Amino acid sequence: MSAANAHSENPTRRDFIYVATTAFGAVGAAMAAWPLIAQMAPDRSALASGTTEVDLSKVAEGQSITVTWRGKPVFIRHRTATDIAAARSVELSKLPDPQDDAARTQKPEWLVVVGVCTHLGCIPNTQANYYGGSGWFCPCHGSQYDTSARIRQGPAPRNLDVPAYAFLSDTKIRIG
Amino acid sequence: MSGSHGQPFHSDNRFVMWLERRLPIISFVNDTLTTFPTPKNLNYWWAFGGILAFCLAVQIITGIVLAMHYAPNTLVAFDSVEHIMRDVNGGWLLRYVHMNGASMFFLAVYIHMFRGLYYGSYKEPREVLWILGCIIYVLMMATAFMGYLLPWGQMSFWGATVITNLFSAIPVVGTDVAQWLWGGYSVDNPTLNRFFSLHYLLPFAIAAVVVLHVWALHVPGNNNPLGIDVKGPQDTVPFHPYYTVKDMLAIVVFMILFAAIVFYAPNLLGEAANYTPADPLVTPAHIVPEWYFLPFYAILRAIPSKLGGVLMMGAAVLSLFLLPWLDTSSVRSGRFRPIFKQFFVLFVINAVILGVVGSQLPEGIWVPLGRICTAYYFIHLWIILPVLGLIEKPLPLPESISKAVLSGASPKGANAAPEKR
């Protein structure tokens, strides 16, 4: 608007009205567009998919189960002593995403992680004899996870996420 | 659009002239599709524009009728596609044409793009024409990607999962963006529904950009295999009947290949895993995108970092937009650029190898090979093309199109009989 008035250095009332009108229109258009954009975000029913309770009493040592939480798989593994030892003996400085195994578990024998590769969302497969115990391998782009589901090699940027969960009793957890 | 060399439009039909004074649409069509002066030396590589228009029409028409039977809901989507295949009258044919039509569309567009690359069709004054073409290409990729989710098979689901997860690589807001795209925490019913809506919309957006593309073509007129400007009426022929007929022949040949695939090998280019209904808890052992995405998929996987891979894949597509300014040579046609010609062949071979790499599991020889080919892709566009324009000594250009055509002479060293017209 600066060059609008060749004959005057100071902006006129008309200049002000132009700017104010245009700004008003732009804000109005943005507000009208907002519901059109917001409707694509997760709706109330998706947000309400909430919590999942899991009974752990039938999961034997060394066994692993997959449960669904918010449409995603969650791996629950009853780790063996070897798994735990392998996860805890590794030097943190050697990890791409350093995280202590103790910080990733509430009880060392139970590992609960979201079973979605942090690279591009595929589901990793269980691999025996992997990093000193049972780990995971993502078939899509080759990410490798150790017995604590920490990324060890491949393109994934992070360890498998640990969801919020709580032990309701010794054999029951609630995820979410 | 552009003025033709011919007389102003006139018709003896009084209604036509009445309409002309109110809406000059008849003269517009006449100038665009009939009298439009076209270089007389276009070879069959120039037929792919017409072939692409045919492909777009086929996809829109078959798509509209398929939508009359398809249901975009995760509970029934897979079954509704099988319903089309088994119950709907001629449904199998419509679906196979639509499904393979996407592959034929990409085959034609890649040939069309490589033609532009070889003959320098992106150079001044056709930069905007080229950029509009790149926009069409990006829209085509988006449309094909969303369409692939609709059958709700295993490859549909996991392909969409992998590609939408690319957005989660964006720092800070990535996860929110991905969830906004999904309408949930993963690819699910809201995702399928919106992909169907957009898959129906985007082809019409493509058609609109095609109109701009043709408009931008008609301002400077066609490039040609010699890459030199039209100097006068002696260098051109009217578009109709010369190129309408030539394009029709090419379209018929193209249709033979199209029909051969549809009728004899309809699943040749598809993935068997997509005939298994989508299962969010089981990832197929090997996820591959459709063949036309493989080179970019190879680039994505070549970079051992999530964000890096995503950025490089985006850069691979965006680099094409900048081609008019990356190529510093003022000579358009590769026919007169002896060194460029060899690098061009290398670039085509490199693109094919990238495609093969993209189809393989990321292990063994395929990892270093993918990295080498990714490096060459960028080196070609960002280093070789700019430098070559400065150091290469091009062959002498012919005086005019008509001189070159009438003498039957091609430049020394160039192929012996390029245009038999």
Image (cartoon, grey):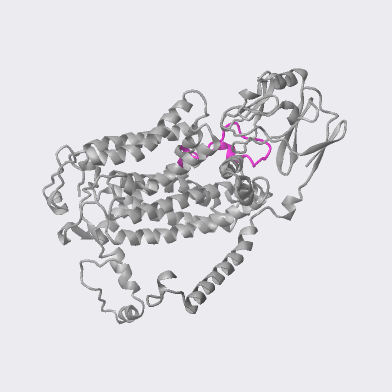
The foreground one among B206 and B97 is B206
Spot occupied by residue B88 in the image (x, y as percentages of width and height): 58, 53
To which quarter of the image does residue A8 belong? Answer: bottom left
The foreground one among A36 and B170 is B170
Residue B176 position (above or below residue B3): above
Q: Which residue is drawn at 19% across and 39% down?
A: B393
Tell me: A37 left or right of B405.
Answer: right
Tell me: B174 left or right of A46.
Answer: left
Q: How many marks?
A: 0
Give the magenta-colored segment's residue range.
B267-294
Q: Does the magenta stretch include residue B88?
A: no
Q: Quadrant of the N terminus of chain B?
A: bottom left
Q: Does the magenta stretch include residue B291?
A: yes
Spot occupied by residue B26 in the image (x, y as percentages of width and height): 33, 72
Spot occupied by residue B119 in the image (x, y as percentages of width and height): 27, 46
Residue B197 position (above or below residue B19): above
Extreme left residue here?
A: B407
Q: Residue at x 33, y 82 (%)?
A: B18
Residue B106 position (above or below residue B378): below
Tell me: B12 left or right of A147.
Answer: left
Spot occupied by residue B318 in the image (x, y as percentages of width and height): 42, 46
The foreground one among B26 and B84 is B26
Extreme front residue here?
A: A9
Extreme right residue here?
A: A169
| Residue B265 shows in the view | no
The foreground one among B246 and B29 is B29
| Residue A13 shows in the view | yes
Main secondary structure of the magenta stretch: loop
